[in-house]
Image (spheres, helix red, strand yellow):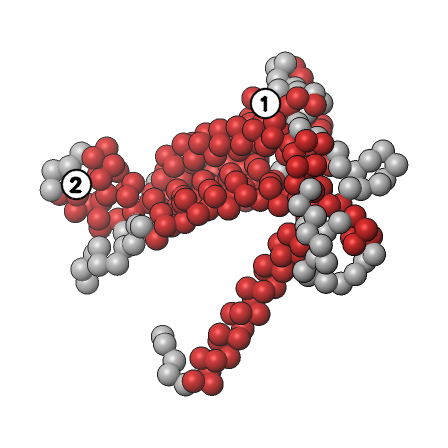
Amino acid sequence: MKTRNPVVRFGQYVALAAYLIFLGFPLLWLLSTSLKSSGEINSLAVNLIPDTFAWGNYPQALERQNLIRSAGNSLFVSVVTMVITTLISMPAAYALARFQGKLRAAGTAWILISQVFPAILLIIPLFMVLRTLQLNDTMFGLILVYVTFTLPFTLWMLQGYVAAIPRDLEEAGAMDGAKRFTVLRLIVFPLLMPGLVATAMFTFVAAWNEFFLALVLIQSPELYTLPLTLRMFIGLEGQTALGPLAAGAVLATIPSLVIFGLLQKRLTSGSLAGAVKG
């Protein structure tokens, strides 16, 4: 409901602006640090705009730890994890939302319970299983683990989108003579598109940013993902190249922003407005 009170509206804009600044400030500070010289960073001066712009941090970040190869590894792992998780989640979430019975209740309960266990409890059994399957220190093994960890939450998220689609639409399609698969393809799938996009974005970002599991499961430097390579900017004696590290972190955020920019329009493309007459 829109308010016409100018004072209330002004307060809403101020609150929204404050929230956006709060969210964006860490990224602005990271960008500022990536453009500062090492001397200015070590001086601990509190200034958002650098005295002199040290653009050399970016080529140093790209050359120092083979950041491009690690970005390629992260992109491959994240995209494959996103595709596999979304393909599995879609039919499973539909079944979870539409079908009734004890099996559904047990599945729902297990999904919720699985979110309670911290990753550190599961990492040793996972490491042993992957070693038995000879998938340890491989990209496929890492993808398998990422799919396993992201699937419960994506299932839970996507079944909410399915439950929001009125059953009347499917029943109307069936009454018009459409078969089950046709109803799913022409009615359910388009309306589910925002949920699929949200699920895909969540899965991609989760795999792109993940550090702990990759640290344990990947040992070969040529298979390092981006978070593992950014760790290498911290020297053995604890000295950190903050400028190149900040530049590398800025570059690491670009693929996520690009993916979000490409998919964000799809988030609202499946509006249900007017789909069912009262």
The three-letter amino acid code for the residue at tag 2 is: Ala
Q: Is residue 51 above or below residue 60?
A: below
Looking at the picture, how far across and down is residue 202, in whole percent? 50, 44
Looking at the picture, how far across and down is residue 136, in whole percent? 65, 19
Residue hosting label 1: 139
Quarter of the view holding residue 137: top right
Name the residue at 54% across, 37% down: 150
Alpha carbon distance from label 2 to label 1: 44 Å
Q: Nearer the viewer, residue 82 or 155?
A: 82
Count of number-bearing discs:
2
The reply, left or right, for residue 274 in relation to residue 132 is left
> Within 10 Å of the Cα at label 1, are there few (<14), some (14-19), or many (20+) other Cα atoms?
many
Judged from the image, the secondary structure of the residue bearing numbered disc 1 is helix
| Residue 130 in view in this figure | no
**Nearer-N-terminus badge (2/1):** 1
* Outermost residue toward the right in this view: 237
The three-letter amino acid code for the residue at tag 1 is: Met
Q: Nearer the viewer, residue 213 or 139?
A: 139
The reply, left or right, for residue 178 in relation to residue 1 is left
Quarter of the view holding residue 143: top right
Looking at the picture, how far across and down is residue 145, in whole percent? 59, 29
Name the residue at 51% across, 46% down: 257
